[in-house]
Image (cartoon, rainbow, N blue to C red):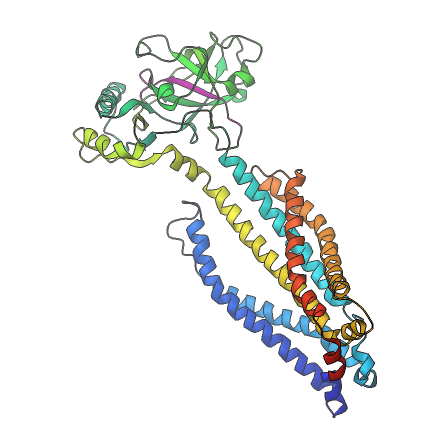
Amino acid sequence: RELAIRTSMGATRSAIVRQLMVESVTVALLGGVLGALLAAAVVAAIVALMPPFTLPSETEIRLSIPVLLFALGACTVSGLLAGCAPAWQAGRANVAEVMKEGGRAVAGGRQGLRRGLVVLEFALALTLLVAGGMTVSALVRLMSVDLGFRGARIVTFDLPVARGRLTSAEEVEGFFRQVLDRTKAVPGVVSVSVSTGMPISGSSFGRAFEIAGRRVADPRRRPGAGINMVTPDYHRTFGIPMVRGRGFTERDRAGSQPVAIVNQAFVKLFLAGVDPVGPRLLFAPFTVGATRPSDALEWEIVGVHGDVINAGPGREPYPEVEIPFWQNPWPRVTVAVHTEREAAAVQSAVADALRPLDPELPMAHVRTIEQTLSLSLAADRFYTVFFAVFAAVALLLAGIGIYGMMSFSVAQRTHEIGLRMALGARQQQVLGQVLREGMLTALAGTAVGAIGATLAGRALAGAVYGVDASNPVTFVAVAVTLLAAALIACLVPARRAASVDPMVTLRSE
């Protein structure tokens, strides 16, 4: 009506269109500037949450001027597009009809575009919320997965022995026997092990192998498995259960029959249907300071241990072979300490015990099992927070969108609502009508968004481990959350409409 008054007073159509475009672009650019200010905080938060070693250390992540200019350009285009619809409507409006009193009482004749935009906004919000919900549920499942071993009161650390210091198997064995003896003597230590790999992190080595009696004609077609050199107390320290056969002992050392222990994943893949204790595996050992490849040895399988997480939480364990550390010593290892007290409490005592061996040898990557598990889930947490933040923003925008549409609709229809109430309509009827219109728009957006949510679920299932796109619980929970937000957003304009005083409204008109 304001535009109709301006037109009747001589304003040209181009002046009206220009005014609407300027208003729309100004609002869009103000939003863009605010977004640029918020972007600085968001970038800092993303960098803080980013998993370690994701990018090179020299990488500098900061706001990019070209990206900011592009964003402001996008805001300008959005403002122009948003201003086109009201400018087009204003250009087509019949000034005489709009100026009439009845012209303001007609309800919602031009709300189709606004409702369509809100429906689209709800559809996009549902898509992002489902994506965020799926990643959150996947992370929860990963954090509650059975690790297959006891993780409480265990601290692990590396001993980065300088290359060239331990040059023979005898030197390696002598050094790490001292490490074990000194660490076991620390008060509160229950057991200690030395190994080249560990649960969660997995094996550091791999080997192609053959099973005796099942020789492969083409060496390139031999299967492979992870190889882990461990001391006899390895399984005891981590609490890994033996399900068949025996563990390693101090008798399994250089000069004795090479032996091996395999996990259940190995048995399932390579020894299904046969007794896993007794077969022999053919592969070459890892020799310290070797100048040529070692000849293959026959390693007799003497035991099978339960599967533990060795490929990351939630992922199927891969086949793994453990061989005695004393039969195949290696200078770069992980030391695991099981304690009676909190693991971190004995860290300094262990460091003091090992210092006489080499004052310059540091304890690197000192972590509890909980910290190791947390690091292994860093990438999953990052993706979860990333999607969850976008989903929360989408939910906020969807709520604001439907609130703005319903509030504008109520403001336009104040005269009509006052007239209805003067003719006998009750407050509950007006309240119900406004809520019904808003929720129908929200339901339409939810229905359209179901398509986008299905596509997003399929895309995430291939990109983020643990996402179950076929689980309807996440979709239902997200849809209910979105509709609840829509209901809350509709309540304010609905209550405003129901509180209209018909006499004041009709008098003002």
Q: Position of residue 73 (x, y in %)?
A: 58, 70
Left or right of 33: which side holds 164?
left
Asked if 377 appears above or below 296 in the picture, the reply is below
Asked if 469 appears above or below 402 in the picture, the reply is above
Q: Which residues are magenta?
A: 315-329
Asked if 140 appears above or below 448 in the picture, the reply is above
Most distant residue in the bottom direction:
9
Q: Position of residue 25 (x, y in %)?
A: 61, 75
Is residue 285 visible from the viewing direction of this image? Answer: no
Q: Position of residue 211 (x, y in %)?
A: 50, 12
Asked if 444 appears above or below 472 in the picture, the reply is below
Where is residue 444, by image quadrant?
A: bottom right
Is residue 454 visible from the viewing direction of this image? Answer: yes
Q: Tell which of 225 and 233 is nearer to you.
A: 233
The quadrant in which the C terminus is found is bottom right
Q: Position of residue 470 (x, y in %)?
A: 67, 38
Most distant residue in the left direction:
356
Where is residue 405, by image quadrant?
A: bottom right
> What secondary structure characterizes most of the magenta part?
loop
Q: Tell which of 328 and 491 is nearer to you.
A: 491
Q: Is residue 322 magenta?
A: yes
